[in-house]
Structure formats: C-alpha cells, structure tokens
Amino acid sequence: MELLALSAWKSIVCLFLFDHILLCFAPSILTRYSIMCADILISDICLPGKKGEKPVTDNCCIAITGDTLTYVGPAEGLQDTKAARVISGRKHLALPGLVNTHCHGAMTLFRGLADDLELTEWLNKHIFPAEAENVSPEMVYWCTKLAAAEMIMSGTTTVADGYFFEHEAARAFIDTGMRAVAAQAVIDFPAPGVPDPAKNIAAVEKFIDHWQGRNPLITPAVFAHSPYTCSNTTLQAAKKAATAAGVLLFIHLAETRHEQSMIEKPLASSPVKHLAALGILDADTVCVHCVWTDEHDLDLLAQHRSSIAVCPQSHLKLASGIAPLQSMLAKDIQVGLGTDGAASNNGLDLFREMDICAKIQKVRQQDPVAVPAESIMAMATTGGAATLGMDNHLGSLKKGMKADIILLNCNSAHLQPMHGRDILVYAANGADVQTVIINGKLVMEEREMLLFDIKETLEKVRNLAGQLHKSR
Ligand SMILES: [Zn+2]
C-alpha cells in the first residue's frame, strides 16, 4: 500500500518536473521536436473541402490556444501536440460559427404572441403595447438568455442584437458565452429604460462608453430603429454618436412597400435616398431588410459601402416582400443573413434561414441558378462577419482567426450521402449541431449547455410569459 502511494507520488513529482522543464525550456524544446501546446485539440474531424475538390476532407485536426485557432488542417501536418483537452471529432464536420446579422433576442417572450398580421398592425396593435407593459431589465436578461441558448444550439456563435435595456442583453450573452454586437435602441417614443426620448442619444453614448473594450465577447453599437420612428434630427445625432465612438449603426430600412409614406419629413423619394440625404450612409452603417429597394437605391448603398442584413423568414411571414438579393450581390454590396426577432420569424435557426433564403430567391428570379447555396453559406459565415466588420478575425476556420467553431453530426439520415457541400444549406438544420466553441471556450458539448442552467432560463421565461398573459 505504502509502496503504491510512494510510486504515485513519484509519478506526480515527475509530471510536475516535466511540465516545469517544458515551461522553462519551452522555446528550444518546441522548435527542436515540433511539440505544439494547445488548450483544445479536435482530432479526427472533417473539414469542408475546397471548391472543385471533395465535399469534405476527413482525418483533420483543429488546435486552439487561448481564444485563437493555431492549427486547422490534415492530421499529418500536426505532430506531437500536447493539449489540455482532446475532443474526438469522429463523424463530425467542423464549420465556422454562424453569424446572425440581425436579431432582437429579448423578443423571444413575444414568440407566437401575434401571428399572421401585417407589419404596421403587428407592431402598433400588438408588439409596441406588449413591449410597453412587459419590457424590464429582468425580461431582457432572461429572454435574451433564451435567445442565446436557441442560437448556440443551432450553430450561431455571433449575433448582432438590438433592443432596449441592452446592458442586460450584453450580460445575458456573456453569461451564455456567446459573442454579440450589442446595440442600444434609439427611438422617438418613450421607451423601456429611456422614458424621455430627448435622452435617447445620451443613453446610447453611455452604453457604448460602458462596453467599449470591457469584454472580448461584446462589441457595442447603435440601433436607430427606423426612419419612420426616428426624426431626422435623431437619426443624425445617432449617427454622429456612432461615428464619434467608432461603432456600427444599425437601422431597419425599406422593409415595407409603404415605408416612404410613414417618414415624417422625407428628404428624398425613397427611404434609402432619405438616409443618404441625411448623411447616415457609410461603411459603418448596416441597413436591415432593404426589401423595397430599386437599382438606384442599391447603387447608393454600394457607393457608400453600407452593408445590408436580410431577414428572409421575417420578410415572408409579415408579407413584406422578397429582398432583391441577387442585385445586391451583383453590385458587390456586403450582405449578411439575419433572423430578426423571434416574434416575426418565429425561430432563430440560421440553417433554416439559409435554406429558405436560397429557395425564395430562385422563385423571385424565376431562375433555379439564382443565388446558389455557396453564396448563401458565405452570407452566414464570412459575409456575415464582414457585414459586422469582423471578417479579419471571424467567419472562417483558418490559423490566426478567433476560435468560434461548430461541430455538426454528419452521421444522420438527412445528411447522407454527402455528395456536396450544398447539403449543408438545403438539408442540415440547427439540431445537427452537437458541440460549440466560442472565443476558444467550450459552451455546448454533445448538446449540453456548459456555462448556464438552461432549465432555470426556461422556467424564468415561462413565468414572464405568464405575467404577460395576466396583463392582457
Ligand atoms: Zn428587426
């Protein structure tokens, strides 16, 4: 017994010494023997093949050190790696985490509350009154947490979120481990958290000041609701605040056919031209929707290098229309994919969004070749990251990029045989995502959320929904 204990102690001392020696002489040892130290090593994983090659390349490895990808490629290219954690990727495919370029996470509370309605009736008679009664810091925290859970479980690792009490939304994203561009809302009505609209710009400035550089998962931004809910003065002040802080400005734009008639003091003949006349359009403005845009509008957006977030399912459900995506892409406008809030979708699964986006574009153009699956997948990954100005570190699986990775189980009936990568757009769904890593940290493993209690979140949101029904 004592001998066994002595032997165990010897092993521990040896291991300690080995680690110590490795740390002391790390540079020379690592160079000489090509030993690589990683925090996480994903082994035996499939990677998407390059264009014109096999749809997937198997027997690959991904190494993560800190928040960064340090190796992505064939297993034979990575030898003698020492990793604190090894994950078997057998029969799984790794993709970059998906990027949702437009969402209102807290609106999960209103999912299914008012379906089958036209946008203005849906907003004015149902959503705005429900928000006036029910939006509180507690509601935003828990309902955003639910949204983050839904997005992580369906492969989204970065979201551009815009809402009221956005401090609470940012806190929810941090607690779930999700990356977010968090945008505080600006609107010319008494709003939750900002009852005096005269203070909406001061509130957004304070929000940005608080979050800039505070947490690697959170990038603050401005969300000016729309040209029909913000005066010209408010829009210009919101853009000035965004520019001064060097952050993005998001705005709902040209969503419905009637939007132009809803703008109080239009400066031009279309919502896009109105924003251009106000000086709102530039490379740091993300215009959400842009369904009702003609060639001149799109030329203006291209000239100003503004990005667009399209939300196909929300456009379909509210019968707003189908965005002219093919023309946007032909003009080299940066376009990302968004879900919008759960109240107008009603889900936050970007795989579902990709499938529908591709198909409705073919119907719009009466052309099955229009906007192929590859373009759609790019919109949900590299294009989404570029829409948010983050493509230098997000949206692709390459050495040096941030480690935002999703692992899909490919061994399911609807994903076999895998003749090509298009199957990921036309047949995969969020439930295929098994494991998610964000900023180098495991946040979901084998569909289990690791950083927070999902049952508690579901219970809190159910209670909030109960209170909502009592107040109606
Ligand atoms: Zn929206």
Image (cartoon, helix red, strand yellow):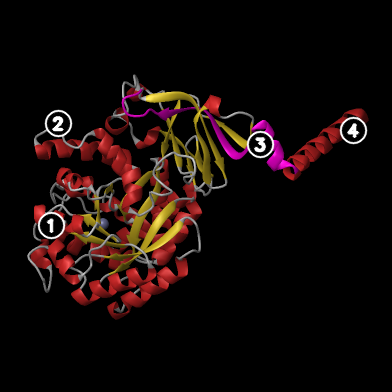
> Dot 4, crowdedness within 10 Å: few (<14), some or many (≥20)?
few
Numbered badge on residue 31: 3
Three-letter amino acid code of the residue under disc 2: Pro
Q: Nearer the viewer, residue 52 or 266?
A: 52
- Front position among marks 4 and 1: 1
Q: Is residue 95 visible?
A: yes
Is tag 4's residue or tag 1's residue first in the polypeptide sequence? 4
Q: CA distance from mark 4 to mark 3?
A: 35 Å
Which stretch is magenta?
25-53
The residue under label 4 is 6
Between 380 and 471, the one nearer to me in the picture? 380
Quadrant into which the N terminus falls: top right
Regarding mark 1 in the picture, which secondary structure is present there? helix
**Residue drawn at 22 percent across, 54 percent down:** 114
Q: Which residue is mark 2?
A: 368
Which label is found at residue 297?
1
Rendered location of residue 369, percent (x, y): 16, 31
Q: Secondary structure at mark 3?
A: helix
Q: Quadrant of residue 305?
A: bottom left
Ligand 1 sits in quadrant: bottom left
Q: Is residue 192 left or right of residue 362?
A: right
Q: Is mark 1 within 8 Å of ligand 1?
A: no
Label 3 or label 2, whichever lies nearer to me, is 3
**What is the three-letter code of the residue carrying label 3?**
Thr
- The residue under the point 29% across, 80% down is 198
In front: 83, or 112? 83
